[in-house]
Image: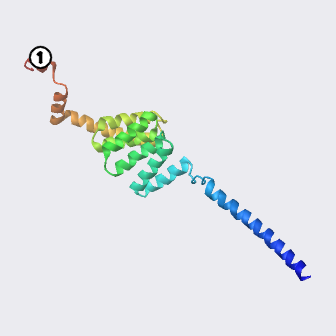
Amino acid sequence: MESQYSKKALVFSAVGSLVIGLVLGGLLTRALFLPASPPVVLDISAQLKDAHALLDKNLLADAERSYRAILGTDPGNTEAVSHLGNVAFQQGDIERAVRFYDMALQQDPSYAHALWDKGIALRAKGDNANAIKAWEAFAQLFPPDSSDVVQVKKWIAEAQAQVDSAATSPEGRLKKLFEKPPEAVLKGKPVK
């Protein structure tokens, strides 16, 4: 009776070892020879939301890295390009910010966010005339009584007042003279 029990135990042990070996072998084979699963990638809108949160927290380097990662996946993402402009603006690099806004507007000339921000950057730079152009393009996209357009119209009026006062100041008149001298001066005749 003991030998029959020993034979059964031996058979069950062998079968159990075989099954365990097959399972482990299959798992190891899969791990070694099959490609790894691609990393989980958030969809673009979730990535943008995360990048915006970093920008809002003033974590500019992290936000820039996030926007550039988005552009690595979606090179034509106007929102990411425009927000790289916001990162540059917050870093104090207005020229770079304007370049990013221009890149975004080349992709989508009616991208309101880039027009709004470009106007702010140009005004900060002292380029009121071009800030007005950006804001006027922005205002054309929305109903005239929308709160954003009302705000932009206030900024346009303020910037226009500065443009007008600069043109009538002695320095402004001199600058204008050098930009486009009178025709008589160009011909070597005295100006009356």
Closer to the camera in the image, 40 or 106 = 40
> Tell me, what colour scheme is on the image?
rainbow
Q: Residue at x 35, y 44 (%)?
A: 97
Query: What is the quadrant of residue 136 in the picture?
Result: top left
Query: What is the quadrant of residue 109 in the picture?
Result: top left
- Residue 40 position within the rendered picture, expressed as x and y whole percent measured from the top left: 58, 54
Residue 79 in view (yes/no): yes
Q: Residue furthest right?
A: 1
- Residue 64 position within the rendered picture, expressed as x and y whole percent measured from the top left: 41, 51
Q: Is residue 91 left or right of residue 192?
A: right
- Residue 5 position within the rendered picture, expressed as x and y whole percent measured from the top left: 88, 79
Amino acid type shown at disc 1:
Lys
Q: Residue at x 39, y 47 (%)?
A: 86
Q: Please, what secondary structure does the residue beneath circle 1 have?
A: loop
Q: Is residue 163 left or right of residue 111?
A: left
Q: Residue furthest front?
A: 3
User: The C terminus appears in which quarter of the rendering?
Assistant: top left
Query: What is the quadrant of residue 59 in the picture?
Result: bottom left
User: The N terminus appears in which quarter of the rendering?
Assistant: bottom right
Which residue is under mark 1? 187
Residue 154 in view (yes/no): no
Structural crowding at the residue carrying mark 1, measured as other residues with C-alpha within 10 Å and reported as few (<14), some (14–19) or many (≥20):
few
Closer to the camera in the image, 150 or 3 = 3
When the figure is inspected, residue 36 is found, relative to residue 151, above or below; the finding is below
When the figure is inspected, residue 178 is found, relative to residue 113, above or below; the finding is above
Q: Is residue 182 left or right of residue 69?
A: left
